[in-house]
Amino acid sequence: MKKIYLDYNASTPIAPDVSRAMQPYLAEHYGNPSSSHWAGAPAKAAVEKARSQLAGLLGCKFSEVVFTSGGTESNNYAIKGTFFALQDKGSHIITSQIEHPAVIQPCKFLEKLGAQITYLPVDARGLVDPDDIKKAIKAETILVSIMHANNETGSIQPISEISKITRERGVWLHSDAAQSVGKIACDVLELGVDLLSVAGHKVYAPKGVGAIFIRQGIELVSFMHGAGHESGRRAGTENVLLNVGLGAAAELAEQLREKSASCELRDLFFDDLQGHFGDRVVLNGHPTKRLPNTLYVSFVGKNGSQILQQLEGVAASTGAACHADSVELSAVLEAMQIDKQVGMGAIRFSLGRATTRTDIKAVVEMLKNVVSG
């Protein structure tokens, strides 16, 4: 049985070049980066090189990059750090209904502390309307947090348009870019963001490492207290090994950017499905404004979980949880107001660097047998 991995939006394998870059820091360079002696110097240099590599991918200053334990911590830092830093200005935060739980749950937590949260709707293609943000901003608004690209649909939000609004109104803008970094351009200057979150394991780096871009002049309140690591922005001895991995992954992503941005295999996949199933298969998300690797389709009237169970050796994700007597659509599909007969058949196929045309053709053939059977 051939195993076909089409769940790259969930996690990516560590790239061979990344693994090689990490090897010396498993045993050879073991010093503390904060130590001033000979053992600490190589570790410190490695962390700063990694910081510069990631800054190169994001188009920012290396001093604006703070390493974290992953995308979840970065999102928590951005949202909670803003709330505690700007309490004298207000406590209103704007986000969307389709954000990752790592954004939604910190917002829910802050509501218990008195924060006012506006959860904006999205259209049928999963996009936020910038005009809704403009209308929602008020004198007490301190932060707008809108993801760059959705993890399910791959739909890419109009962050540059949103940033023009937030800049005019003097409101900080945060974007969860866990899914977009390494797949499409994520230049923080072009996007106009003040804060941006990165997750290592989505970009062929190890799990357990991430970063947050904090624009120069932005002062967040840290929730990791201790010594003055990361220029006083995140306490805790730097994870040299994982930071090196993320830096190497960022440099590799920059080198492969054009190839990563290709939609050829994704579109071939959908064309083949439509050629066989016709209007029995529909696309969830925006037809063009979405990640080049993401195909989120629904097999109308079918059960996505049951289909996946029969695709032996294929790794992908569903958009609905099916129970004994009911089907529960994901929060994203619910927000898009997708009909239950469509949403229950949702499957997300996310392609990666190792995905081949042969893989796509094999999965299409399996789907023909399973769905038509």
Image (cartoon, rainbow, N blue to C red):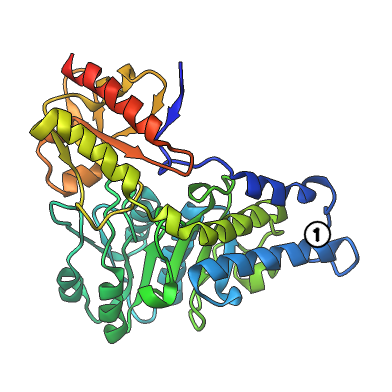
Q: Nearer the viewer, residue 286 or 235?
A: 286
Q: How far from the left and from the top, in percent, is residue 177?
A: 41, 59
| Residue type, label 1 | Asn
Q: How far from the left and from the top, in percent, is residue 39?
A: 88, 60
Quarter holding the C terminus is: top left
Q: Is residue 50 left or right of residue 129?
A: right
Q: How far from the left and from the top, in percent, is residue 178?
A: 43, 55
Q: Which residue occupies 28% across, 59% down?
A: 156
Q: Is residue 7 left or right of residue 247?
A: left
Q: Which residue occupies 22% across, 34% down?
A: 272
Q: Which residue is mark 1?
A: 32
Q: How far from the left and from the top, in percent, is residue 326?
A: 17, 24
Assign a secondary structure to mark 1. Answer: loop
Residue that extends furthest to the top in the rendered view of this protein:
373
For residue 148, above or below residue 152 = below
Disc 1 packing (10 Å; few <14; some 14–19; many ≥20): some
Q: Which residue occupies 83% across, 66% down?
A: 41
For residue 138, above or below residue 370 = below
Residue 329 appears anywhere in the view:
no
- Tally the numbered discs: 1
* Corner quadrant of residue 359: top left
